[in-house]
Amino acid sequence: MEGKQPESEHSEHSDAVRDDGVEPYGPGGKFLQVLGDVPPTFEVINQVSGVLRDPWCRPVTVCGRMRISQCHRWHPLRLRGVISVILVMDQFLDRFGEVSDTAPGSGFYKGLMTAMITLGAFIGAMNQGWLADAYSRKYSIMIAVAIFTVGSVLQTAAIDYPMLVAARLIGGIGIGMLSMVVPLYISEISPPEIRGTLLVLEELSIVVGIVVSFWITYGTQYIHSHWSWQLPFLLQIVPGLILGFAAIFLPFSPRWLASQGREQEALVELAKLRRLPATDARVQKEWSEIITDAKFQAATVKQRHPSLAGGSTISKVRLEFAGWVDCVRPGCWRRTLVGAGLMFFQQFVGINALIYYAPTLFGTMGLDLNMSLIMSGVVNVAQLVGVISSLWTMDRFGRRKLLLTGSVAMCISHIIITALVGMYSGNWPQHTTAGWTSVAFLFVYMLAFGASWGPVPWAMPAEIFPSSLRAKGVAISTCSNWINNFIIGLVTPPLVQNTGWGAYLFFAFFCLFSGLWTFYFVPETNGKTLEQMDDVFNDCTGAEEMAQRANLREQMASQSIAS
């Protein structure tokens, strides 16, 4: 609503005691009681500080740190930073001559090698859902780490181009699996008061990994042997092994246990996570909500697909497929379109193309190789600054305004770079001012992306889907990210090689289109409740679910009194 500051997900928990008389967990409760009233500007800082300091939240913090260190959930955190430098190393080009600029078809081979890891991630993300449901979030993390480690070892030991491509595909499968299960696990074990903050920290962890990995790889280029490119590939095994080993000691997700009918075990694990007695009112209330949700999910499946409620293997497979189809049925298809569309434009505005091939692109602006590498690292820092700013701006200004502003700023930057590269790329030494102006607008682009199209597409999908379809809706959005990431990685090298300034014009068009699409199709979701989300998307999916949940709670309360 214009003229009214929307209530953020954080602020609705800011009181020390909720309306139901139960004190909230963590930074929304105990931590803010200690601080007292604080200026709104610093609210999100207190939220993050609460995540790090509150003992009830430490299990979540540990997982978050693992995620930052790990090669990702994710866009290949380290791999995005690593590959941009490795692609210009002489030792690497000597071993894999197919990707050398002088080799025939090098643009295609370079794109295939770069994009293969995102294709693997798409495959991994598509298949992780049933693994996480069948074997638990904890064990599926360990499986994903094992696959990722095998891929990293094979990349390090690759002796020819086909082996390297296959190794990156295997490693990508592990990354895609982690990209699904780690955020799911963290959201399931975290106190409600900090889930919104963790959504913003998601993109921050990605960019921190990119920055750190880039500068590590920049340093290894001075090793005058094959270890200059093998060491970065080998080092990414370390955080993977740390995560895999630490996963042994992680608790099972209480929500997964509840979905398996292991209700008392869910209570025990929840009490451990909150570091409170199982009899504590807060633990009991959250446990009751978890059990209600698990029963609601089961009841919803039976209601939507009564003929598939049997326990046979064929019924389970058909039911899994039907769940995906539900995401595109009337009542949910607009939400799915928004989630998948955000991820599409996140890739097609050109961010990964600039990160993967930044040294090459800086070369088209007239910079020598060493300066191109240095500036590639600096623009990653610019993106990090933009992401940090979104910790404050996302809830204050809303998702939609950030997306629109980011699209405009990125489009203008691309157009100016297109004009300068098109006019002066034939003689950069005589036009150094134009070259550095291009670099400056690339910085503007990275800042704008980091503050808008970087974090928002990861935050919105978790907000817009009703609970019964949230897991699959977020999965579709994530898979959209990976498959479009794959396409961008595949087409960018020949695009840059054959068109020069045309690559920037290509991405400028999609920046413009992203703004128009956002203006006409993306609603503001900041601070909206489930019922309000129905009004936003002009359906009644959420309200129907709320009514069903209320009836289920009444039935459970009646059964409890009767017993």
Image (cartoon, rainbow, N blue to C red):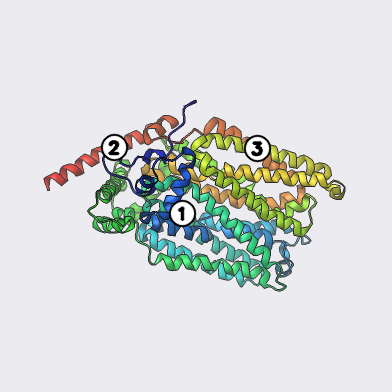
Residue on which disc 3 sits: 409
Q: Position of residue 543 (x, y in %)?
A: 34, 33
Check disc 2 and report its element: helix, strand or loop: loop
Q: In the drawing, does residue 243 fall left or right of residue 306?
A: right
Residue on which disc 2 sits: 19
Check disc 3 and report its element: helix, strand or loop: helix
Res. 559 image quadrant = top left
Q: Is residue 55 visible?
A: yes
Measure the alpha-carbon separation of dots 1 and 3: 31 Å
Q: Is residue 145 above or below residue 454?
A: below
Q: Earlier in the sequence, mark 2 or mark 3?
A: 2
Measure the alpha-carbon separation of dots 1 and 2: 34 Å
Camera-side residue of 155 and 83: 83
The residue shown at (21%, 39%) is: 554
Residue on which disc 1 sits: 180
The amino acid pointed to by label 3 is: Ala
Q: Is residue 331 above or below residue 310?
A: above
